[in-house]
Image (tube, grey):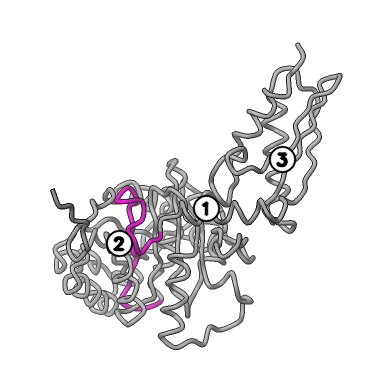
C-alpha cells in the first residue's frame, strides 16, 4: 500500500506545538508535504523562531506521526523558520484570541488557585509545582505562574532555565512535564537577585498576566509571595474568580503566621479552598516510621480557625527533597513516594472552577 501526501499531512498537522498547545496545521507550521517512491515522506516543519528550543522534540513528534501512516517507510523532516510576515500574523492572531487573566481567564471554565503562605520556608513553591504537575498527569491543561518575584524557584523545581519564546509582544509559556510555566527566573541568571520596588513588580505581574499566551487552560496555579503584603494583594485584585489555598507546617509559629493569610482572604472576599499542611512528618526511608519534626496539629488548627477544610498533610521524605534538587516534580519522579501520593490526592480534591461573579463589573445594557 502506497501512502498519499494528504494522509501524511493530516497526521503531521495534528501534532501539538508544546508551547502554544495547538495543532501545527492550525498554526501554519507545516510547509510542503510529499511522498516519494519507496514510501519516503518529506515534510517541511516551519518553526516560529530560528532558535526554537524545542526544535528537536517537535521534529521527533512530526517524524513519529508521519511514520505511523500506512505505507510510509521513512520520514525526512526539514526544519526551517516561519517567514517573518507569517510569524507576525500568527502573533497577532494569538493576541486577538488570548484571554487576559485580568479579564477572567476562560470565562469561568478555568479554575484559578493562588497558593499562599504566611511565611517563607514552608514549602509553598514545592507544593505549587507538584500540584500543577499532578493535575497535568491527570490529563488537565495546566499553567503555573511564579509570582514570587523575589524568591522565584519554579525554574529550579521543573529543571528548566531559558527565556520564553516571544512572538511579537506575546510571550509563550515554557513547557515542562505538561505544565505551562512563566517566571521572572526565566529572564535572569540563576544567582541574580531581583532588586525591585513595588511598582516594578506590579508592572511585571501585569505583563505575565496579559502578555502571555496561556491558551485554553483547565487550571492555573499561582505561586504567591509569602505573607500578605502589596505583591499578594495586587495579584488577588488583578485576577477575578480566584481561589486561595493556604500552606503551613505543623509548627505553631508557622500556623500563627498563616492565620493572617486566612484573615486576608476573608477581608478581601477571596474564598479559601482549604489548608495544606506540608512537612507533616519526616518519613524514614528504611522503616517508613514517621517523626513529627515540626510538631503536630498546625494544619488542623488553622483549618478550623479559618472554617475551611484540611485538604491534606504532606510528609517530608527523601524522594521529595531529592526530586526537587534534581528539578523534577516528585509526583512525576517517584509517584509511589508518600509525599507524591498525598500531593496527587490533594490535586484531585481541589474544587472546580468558580463561576464568574458579576459583582463590581460593568455590564452591557440594551434598550428595547
Q: Is residue 48 magenta?
A: no
Label 1: how many Cα within 10 Å (few below 14, some 14–19, many 20+): some
Q: Splitting the image into 4 quarters, where does residue 327 fall? A: bottom right
Q: Is residue 103 magenta?
A: yes
Q: Position of residue 35 (x, y in %)?
A: 79, 24
Comparing marks 3 and 2, which lies closer to the viewer?
3
Q: Nearer the viewer, residue 109 or 363?
A: 363
Q: CA distance from mark 3 to mark 2?
A: 40 Å
The correct choice, above or below, for 211 with respect to 353 in the image is below
All told, the count of numbered labels is 3
Residue under pointer 2: 276
Asked which secondary structure carries label 1, the reply is helix
The correct choice, above or below, for 71 with respect to 332 in the image is above
The answer to whether 277 appears left or right of 92 in the picture is left
Q: Position of residue 49 (x, y in %)?
A: 70, 56
The label on residue 94 is: 1
The label on residue 65 is: none
Q: Position of residue 306 (x, y in %)?
A: 16, 67
Asked which secondary structure carries label 3, the reply is helix
- Residue at image x 58%, y 56%? 91
Asked which secondary structure carries label 2, the reply is strand
Span colored in magenta: 100-120
Sequence order check, earlier mark of 1 and 3: 3
Residue under pointer 3: 60
Amino acid at each position: 500500500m502506497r501512502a498519499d501526501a494528504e494522509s501524511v499531512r493530516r497526521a503531521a498537522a495534528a501534532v501539538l506545538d508544546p508551547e502554544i498547545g495547538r495543532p501545527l496545521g492550525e498554526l501554519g507550521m507545516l510547509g510542503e508535504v510529499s511522498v516519494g517512491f519507496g514510501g519516503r515522506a518529506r515534510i517541511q516543519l516551519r518553526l516560529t523562531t530560528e532558535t526554537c528550543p524545542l526544535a528537536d522534540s517537535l521534529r521527533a513528534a512530526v517524524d513519529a506521526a508521519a511514520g505511523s501512516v500506512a505505507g510510509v517507510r521513512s520520514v525526512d523532516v526539514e526544519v526551517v523558520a516561519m517567514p517573518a510576515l507569517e510569524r507576525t500574523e500568527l502573533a497577532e492572531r494569538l493576541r486577538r484570541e488570548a484571554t487576559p487573566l485580568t479579564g477572567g481567564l476562560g470565562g469561568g471554565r478555568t479554575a484559578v488557585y493562588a497558593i499562599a503562605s504566611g511565611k517563607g520556608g514552608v514549602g509553598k513553591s514545592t507544593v505549587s509545582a507538584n500540584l500543577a504537575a499532578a493535575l497535568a498527569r491527570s490529563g488537565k491543561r495546566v499553567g503555573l505562574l511564579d509570582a514570587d518575584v523575589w524568591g522565584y524557584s519554579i525554574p529550579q523545581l521543573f529543571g528548566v532555565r531559558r527565556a520564553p519564546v516571544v512572538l511579537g509582544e506575546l510571550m509563550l509559556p515554557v513547557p515542562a512535564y505538561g505544565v505551562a510555566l512563566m517566571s521572572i527566573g526565566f529572564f535572569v541568571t540563576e544567582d541574580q537577585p531581583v532588586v525591585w520596588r513595588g511598582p516594578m513588580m506590579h508592572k511585571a505581574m501585569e505583563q505575565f498576566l496579559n502578555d502571555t499566551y496561556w491558551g485554553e487552560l483547565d487550571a492555573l496555579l499561582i505561586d504567591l509571595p509569602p505573607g500578605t503584603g502589596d505583591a499578594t494583594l495586587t495579584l488577588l485584585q488583578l485576577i477575578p474568580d480566584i481561589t486561595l489555598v493556604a500552606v503551613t507546617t505543623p509548627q505553631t509559629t508557622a500556623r500563627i503566621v498563616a492565620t493572617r493569610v486566612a484573615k486576608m482572604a476573608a477581608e478581601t472576599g477571596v474564598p479559601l479552598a482549604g489548608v495544606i499542611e506540608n512537612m507533616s512528618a519526616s518519613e524514614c526511608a528504611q522503616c517508613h516510621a514517621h517523626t513529627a519534626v515540626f510538631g503536630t496539629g498546625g494544619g488542623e488548627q488553622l483549618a478550623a480557625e479559618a472554617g475551611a477544610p484540611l485538604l491534606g498533610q504532606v510528609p517530608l521524605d527523601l524522594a521529595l527533597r531529592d526530586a526537587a534538587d534534581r528539578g523534577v516534580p516528585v509526583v512525576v519522579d517517584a509517584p509511589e513516594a508518600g509525599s507524591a501520593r498525598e500531593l496527587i490526592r490533594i490535586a484531585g480534591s481541589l474544587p472546580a472552577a468558580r463561576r464568574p461573579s458579576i459583582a463590581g463589573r460593568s455590564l452591557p445594557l440594551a434598550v428595547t
